[in-house]
Image: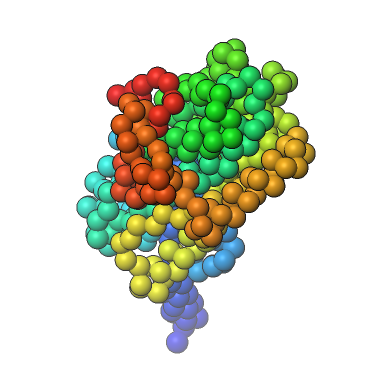
Amino acid sequence: MKLSKLLATAAVALGLATTAMAQDKTKVGFVYVGPIGDGGWTYEHNKGRLALEKEFGDKVETVFVESVPEGPDAERVMTQMALEGADLIFTTSFGYMDPTINVAAKFPNVKFEHATGYKRADNVSTYSARFYEGRAIQGHIAGKMTKSNKIGYIGSYPIPEVIRGINSAFIHARKVNPDVQFKIVWAYTWFDPAKEADAAKVLIEQGADIVLQHTDSTAPQAAAQAAGNVYTFGQASDMAEYGPKPRISSIIDDWAPYYIARTKAVMDGTWTSTDTWDGIGPGMVGIGEISSEVPEDVKAEALALKDAIASGAYHPFTGPLKKQDGSDWLKEGETADDGTLAGMNFYVEGIEGDIPQ
């Protein structure tokens, strides 16, 4: 056999082997609403992606696109990922819900996982974290720490996930401080540092000496730091660089175990469409270190509350509770069911102002 023919045969064999190796890899895509350096929501999702790579090594290939607007752009990005061979795609923002369902219908062999939504299909799962559990702890600390009795809250969009958090924080602030008032500003964005900073400044100008946020950047932390006499809580990520003041604790989202488990299910052929909603107990919601600015007795109370929620001994939405209009919601000792929480579209008694429609 001539040398040229031998080389050609070897090249073909190598090509086939390389193709087989590529096919053995599970390709996992991530669609992000913000930049991976946002220091909050997207930063933590990307940490989960990196943990996935570390866990499976050369058995996986991950791809991501950051700063994808909710809407038609998201649908285009997901479609491209599917066309380029993704086996599993995580879509990590509420507004990706309909685009995820639409693209999944066109690619029945691709598995999709949508974060914080509620629409599922044979090849679409949903997952979220019980952020409201962390808000209960933040509310307790805030109610104890405020001197002005005015607590500011930056909301992203008036959707159930955000409304749950506002209600939970308020309930637990009022439990320890009946004089607390909540001032709520809607930013109508997940990630826009300028808008988030402006929202924080408005709340501080209105007398809030504690600011909670359900937006993704560290801009509210920086605004509070500049004000000098305001406390904050890290959102989605620890934001520890702003501690011990203004940041006095945080809610930390830990997506890595979920991403690893769901990718393994695709590899094993055991993936099925499911809905996952985990909290402090399973570890999807973490509570960042409570800083030295918080008195030891308040810290101890907050940690005891965390333990009670984690064990299931206490539910943040436990009656008696009324709705904002004064109507009865939960009787003494009654707890809210997941269906009501998932669709929450009302404030609890004591919160001022209307939910934007």
- The residue closer to the viewer here, 22 or 110, is 110
Residue 144: x and y, percent? 64, 33
The residue drawn where x is 52% and y is 27% is: 153
- The residue closer to the viewer here, 146 or 12, is 146
In the picture, residue 159 is in which quadrant? top left
In the picture, residue 274 is in which quadrant? bottom left
Residue 320: x and y, percent? 41, 41
Q: Is residue 217 visible?
A: no
**On the rendered structure, is 336 left or right of 153?**
left
**On the rendered structure, is 321 left or right of 307?**
left
- Work out which quarter of the rendered image holds the C terminus and state it: top left
Residue 112: x and y, percent? 34, 55
205 to 300, vertically: above or below: above
The residue drawn where x is 59% and y is 12% is: 205
186 to 265, vertically: above or below: above
The residue drawn where x is 55% and y is 28% is: 178
Question: Extreme top residue here?
Answer: 205
